[in-house]
């Protein structure tokens, strides 16, 4: 095998194995001629600088260097980097032709080859006896190694930026680890977290009971993270969002041709959650047929795909959640009693936000910081007056509603402050005194459409007639822009009244 072919094969193998250019060049040293000297330099188009990324000789290696180039030399070297020819001469001739390219300690026969790959331009400098053949063999693998070096730098820079952002977030939230994401674990959710820690290491089915928006999925994820299945998948299925005719296929999968449109076999949620945790949200919405099949999986871990005959076995821990009264559903016959007994081996009741008011300051701070990061606004924390308004509100939507209110307050405050009063309604919410409540109950209430019209008009006035976007009325009202326009047409609210 010719020496140049063996050198090229070695270079390609090193380029595939070594992401760092210095390691790549060091691996080439034994294959070069005695006394040879090699340098790989990058042409930085952003700064018009020449950067030496790797330089080796028979007995030494050099650090990375950067030097500025004058426009004439930059143009000449850029043309050389993108050209197909290998320049051959002596080091002295190269210094005369490209002044500033070589230091005075380069000597002897020299070859210059351009390196260009993935929009990365560079130069290969090789000084040894008969350097042209070796430079030609090294040209393509060195270009690949140079591109690998820059990609490695980008990834390293991204990792450093992500870690810095993570550490800054932990500092602001006063936490030791980003996985510690359950606000109120030491206060309003203390009993919940004690129950989670007690049952997490077992494979017992868990039923989380709580109102909509109270954080059932957060508790389910905490169960998974503290369990022996933490390395396995955690999959969430909203049972109320799956059409009844597709529930069996979604949960248990189907075989090819089992029904119209089944063009291939498909794994269901249980198969995909094997060796992990399957979170069945809104489990009370499952139809009767799916309840029977779910019971069988919980009993023996076996099921069949739709249209299949083979019994499949999986190792899945089921965590279910519901905002319904399943005991009442069992009494009515809407939910199977035997499935209830299987799911409710270890029930965890989750208190609504109105029963854990001591967590509101910490939750408000958490969601305020998150809203500021999402919206690109300066972080603003709620003051004592804001916290008073938040504590007085009944929170029918629980933690999910609190997150929406704080994000809306950040938008309405426009980065200067949190406008919690407007985020909660047209006027600050204050619980009425008893005489006022009695007088209000005796007064004839306004119609629903009139109240809705006033609420939308107030939002449009605050947003200067803007409907869509981060400062639009649709976001302030937590509505889809198309829904808001449709409702405005129905209520006869003019489009341009609030603009200008």
Image (tube, rainbow, N blue to C red):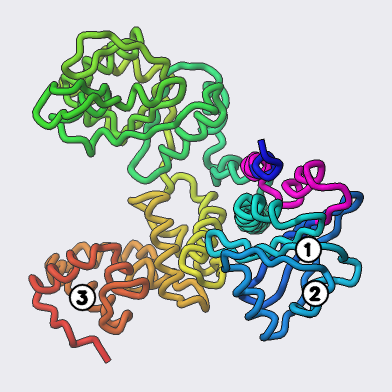
Q: CA distance from mark 1 to mark 3?
A: 83 Å
Nearer-the-camera pick, 298 or 47: 47
In the displayed structure, 392 sits above or below 217; it is: below
Look at the image and tell me in which quarter the N terminus lies: top right
> In the image as oriented, which residue stretches furthest toward the bottom?
500
Look at the image and tell me in which quarter the C terminus lies: bottom left
Nearer-the-camera pick, 292 or 19: 19
Pointer 1: residues within 10 angstroms few (<14), some, or many (20+)?
many
Q: Could you tell me which secondary element the residue under label 1 belongs to?
A: strand
Q: Which residue is mark 2?
A: 93
Q: Which mark is residue 454?
A: 3
In the displayed structure, 265 sits above or below 135; it is: above
Predominant secondary structure in magenta?
A: helix
Residue at 55% in and 69% down: 380
Q: CA distance from mark 2 to mark 3?
A: 84 Å
Q: CA distance from mark 1 to mark 2?
A: 9 Å
Residue at 31% in and 10% down: 302
- Specify the segment rendered in magenta: 9-37
Query: Tags 1 and 2 in contact by the CB under 8 Å rule?
Result: yes
Residue at 42% in and 23% down: 206
In the displayed structure, 434 sits above or below 137; it is: below
């Amino acid at each position: 095998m010719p020496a140049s072919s063996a050198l090229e094969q070695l270079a390609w193998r090193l380029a595939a194995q070594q992401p760092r250019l210095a390691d790549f060049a060091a691996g080439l040293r034994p294959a070069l001629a005695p006394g040879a000297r090699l340098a790989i330099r990058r042409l930085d188009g952003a700064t018009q600088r020449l950067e030496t990324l790797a330089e080796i000789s028979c007995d030494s290696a050099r650090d990375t260097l950067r030097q500025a180039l004058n426009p004439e030399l930059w143009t000449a070297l850029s043309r050389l980097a993108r050209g197909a020819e290998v320049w051959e001469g002596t080091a002295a001739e190269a210094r005369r032709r490209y002044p500033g390219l070589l230091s005075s300690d380069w000597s002897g026969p020299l070859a210059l080859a351009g390196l260009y790959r993935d929009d990365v331009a560079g130069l290969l400098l090789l000084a040894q006896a008969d350097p042209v053949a070796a430079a030609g063999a090294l040209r393509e693998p060195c270009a690949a190694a140079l591109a690998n070096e820059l990609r490695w730098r980008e990834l390293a820079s991204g990792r450093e930026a992500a870690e810095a952002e993570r550490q800054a977030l932990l500092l602001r939230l006063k936490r030791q680890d980003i996985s510690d994401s359950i606000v109120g674990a030491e206060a309003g959710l203390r009993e919940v977290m004690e129950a989670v820690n007690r049952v997490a290491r077992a494979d017992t089915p868990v039923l989380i009971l709580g109102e909509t928006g109270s954080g059932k999925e957060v508790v389910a994820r905490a169960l998974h993270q503290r369990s022996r299945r933490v390395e396995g998948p955690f999959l969430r299925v909203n049972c109320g969002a799956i059409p009844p005719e597709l529930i069996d296929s979604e949960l248990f999968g189907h075989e090819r041709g089992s029904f119209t449109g089944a063009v291939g076999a498909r794994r269901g949620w249980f198969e995909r959650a094997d060796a992990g945790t399957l979170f069945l949200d809104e489990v009370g919405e499952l139809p009767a047929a799916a309840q029977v099949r779910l019971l069988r999986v919980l009993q023996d871990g076996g099921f069949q795909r739709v249209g299949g005959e083979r019994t499949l076995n999986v190792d899945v821990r089921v965590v279910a959640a519901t905002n319904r009264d399943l005991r009442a559903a069992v009494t009515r016959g809407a939910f199977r009693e035997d499935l209830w007994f299987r799911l409710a081996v270890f029930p965890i009741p989750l208190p609504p936000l109105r029963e854990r008011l001591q967590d509101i300051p910490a939750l408000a701070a958490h969601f305020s910081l998150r809203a500021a990061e999402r919206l690109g606004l300066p972080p603003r924390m709620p003051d004592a007056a804001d916290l008073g308004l938040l504590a007085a509100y009944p929170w029918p939507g629980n933690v999910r509603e609190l997150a929406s209110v704080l994000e809306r307050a950040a938008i309405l405050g426009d980065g200067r402050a949190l406008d919690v009063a407007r985020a909660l309604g047209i006027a600050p919410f204050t619980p009425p005194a008893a005489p006022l409540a009695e007088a209000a109950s005796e007064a004839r209430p306004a119609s629903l459409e009139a109240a809705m019209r006033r609420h939308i008009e107030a939002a449009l006035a605050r947003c200067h007639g803007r409907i869509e976007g981060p400062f639009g009325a649709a976001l302030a009202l937590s509505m889809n822009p198309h829904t808001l326009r449709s409702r405005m047409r129905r209520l006869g609210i003019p489009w341009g009244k609030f603009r200008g």
